[in-house]
Amino acid sequence: MTEVVFPNEAGALLQMRAAALLRETGVAIEQLGAIKPAALRKRVELRLATDLESRRQDLRKLLDGGGGPLSDGAWNKLHRLRTELDALFEETLALMEGAALRKAGLDGGCLLADRLADEISVLTPENWNAFTVLDTDEFYAGSTRVIRVRFPADSFWDLPVVAHEFGHFVGTTLTVMRRGKEVLALEEELADAGSPDHRSWLHESFADVFATYVIGPAYGLSCAFERFNPVAADKDDDHPAPNTRLALIEGVLAAYADGHPHDGYDRMISRIHDVWAAQTTEAGVHGTIGLREPFGRWLAFSLGLLRAALPLAAYDGWWRTTVLAKQLGDGERVDDVTKWSLRDIVNAAWLARTVAPGGEATDRIAQRAHALAELRCLEVRDVRHPK
Ligand SMILES: [Zn+2]
């Protein structure tokens, strides 16, 4: 039997691993160039290539240590680079797969989802520089910018969920000043959250609060009418129970209803409540929308963070969307589409739906709103790469 001989110079095993990781990084950089179509590649290439290249340089520095004694913390440095590169590889692969599906014509609502995410991105200090990809469900994969849109993604009514997914990405980048120091507030809160369940629920709670903050009532309406499952109204899993999530959403809307003379938000809170209660009653599920701890505390924390870090990002267009909602409901011509943001169109469609007489009218509103949103994207091109 042949005896296996390990290299016995100090650091040689570490160097073999670093060299392998260096080769993998080179392959990932090369593959970025293969993302097609070019319009999607341009959204991500520079950012990902820069992130990968900076880790490649760090790996080269680690290797330049030569076969001599191990430098201080070399294994920890390699571990950090491995973790960061794994996240970048995962993101690169998800974007390559997503681009291939979209190139094959399966993009459904992805174009509008990209543009809505762009519109939200300009409200934040962090440039998104990515595109949405199709998947079996919307979910947050952690530390990447990939926003997954649920296949087949052909419903206009699903669009507000993009804001929730964006919230996962942007939340951990928001800073506030504490004791004279800039701190990542959500990261700090997550570190104090305790169990893995609590960390996951805090992340989801923040994303719900963020989505309601930047999109307004349309997010809560889409959750109550379409997204949340009434049969599981009281069940926590990787997300908090729908009854809790709707309470968070209503909490944000109530905070804005308070300071405004218009009663539009109050009416939408009632609508969310009523439509959800009707479904849970029919499904034979007891329990109602309500906040329990620590969700009440997390609502206050998330809203406080958003008001401090993104004071101008709160959606305030609801008060003018009544005109557009009527036009969408009645099928009237909309003259100047450029004066409406995508967030306005999404909210106007949802407002029109809350008074629509039934399924056919709802479908017509979705078709009109979709066409209007696409026209708006054609006429206002500068939003694609806002920064
Ligand atoms: Zn989520």
Image (cartoon, rainbow, N blue to C red):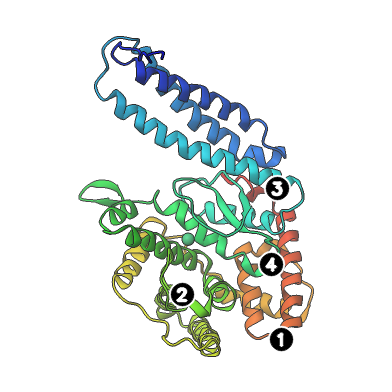
State the CA–CA distance, disc 1 to disc 4: 17 Å
Proximity of marks 1 and 4: CB atoms separated by less than 8 Å = no
Alpha carbon of mark 2 to alpha carbon of mark 1: how far? 25 Å
Residue displayed at 55% across by 85% down: 279
The residue that mark 1 highlights is: 358
Q: Label 2 amino acid?
A: Pro
SS for dot 4: loop
The residue identified by callout 4 is 155
Is residue 1 at all visible to an observer of this figure? yes
The residues bearing labels 4 and 2 have C-alpha atoms spaced at a distance of 21 Å
Q: Could you tell me if residue 341 is visible in this image?
A: no
Q: What amino acid is found at the position of numbered circle 3 in the picture?
A: Leu
For the C terminus, the image quarter is top right
Disc 3, SS: helix
Q: Which residue is mark 2?
A: 242
- Residue 189 appears at what percent x and percent y? 29, 57
- Mark 4 and mark 2 lie on one chain; the one further toward the N terminus is 4
CA distance separating discs 3 and 4: 18 Å
Which amino acid, by three-letter code, is at mark 1? Gly
Residue 267 appears at what percent x and percent y? 52, 86
Q: Write down the quadrant of residue 365 in the picture.
A: bottom right
Q: N-terminal of the two: label 1 or label 4? A: 4
First reached walking from the N terminus: tag 3 or tag 1: 3
Quadrant of image for the N terminus: top left
Label 4 near ligand 1 (CB < 8 Å): no
- Comparing 210 with 60, the one in front is 60
- SS assignment at label 2: helix
**Residue with the mark numbered 3:** 101
Is ligand 1 within 8 Å of the beta carbon of the residue shown at mark 3? Answer: no
